Amino acid sequence: MSECQLLETCIFFNDQMDAMPAVANLMKNRYCKGDFAACARLKVVKTVGREKVPTDMFPNQDDYAERTIAQG
């Protein structure tokens, strides 16, 4: 199984999820080690750049990603 190219450097998982390791592992398995193309954070990275990804965006927040992308 392939992994997201940004898994090792993803700020969300490496800095934001320390207090919720069980939730982080579930999300990593689904988005980072599974259907990473569905990750809202990755969509923003690929569309408008890594610097535009909000630090509080969860991988399942497609609506947040769409608003962020629309703002460019």
Image (tube, helix red, strand yellow):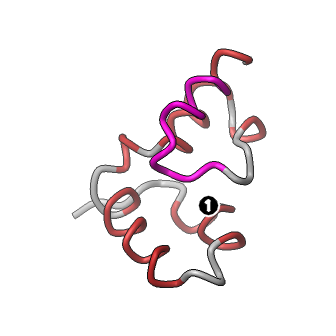
In the picture, the quarter occupied by the C terminus is top right
Judging by the rendered image, the residue that carries numbered circle 1 is: 10
69 relative to 53, above or below: above
Picture quarter containing residue 30?
A: bottom left
Outermost residue to the right: 51
**72 displayed left or right of 31:** right
| Disc 1 crowd, CA 10 A, few/some/many (<14, 14-19, 20+) | some
Amino acid type at image mark 1: Cys
Magenta span contains residue 70: no
**Residue located at (40% from left, 60% from top):** 32
Judge whether 22 appears above or below 4 on screen.
below
Q: How many labels does the image show?
A: 1
* Whole-percent x, y for residue 29 in the image: 33, 69
Q: Is residue 24 above or below residue 72?
A: below
Task: Give the image quarter of residue 71.
Answer: top right
**Residue 61 on image: x %, y %:** 51, 42
Q: Does the magenta stretch include residue 64?
A: yes
Residue 25 placement, left or right of 57 = left
Name the element at disc 1. Answer: loop
Return the x and y of residue 27 as percentages of the image width and height: 41, 65
Where are the magenta residues, as a range? 57-68
Residue farthest along the left direction in this orientation:
1
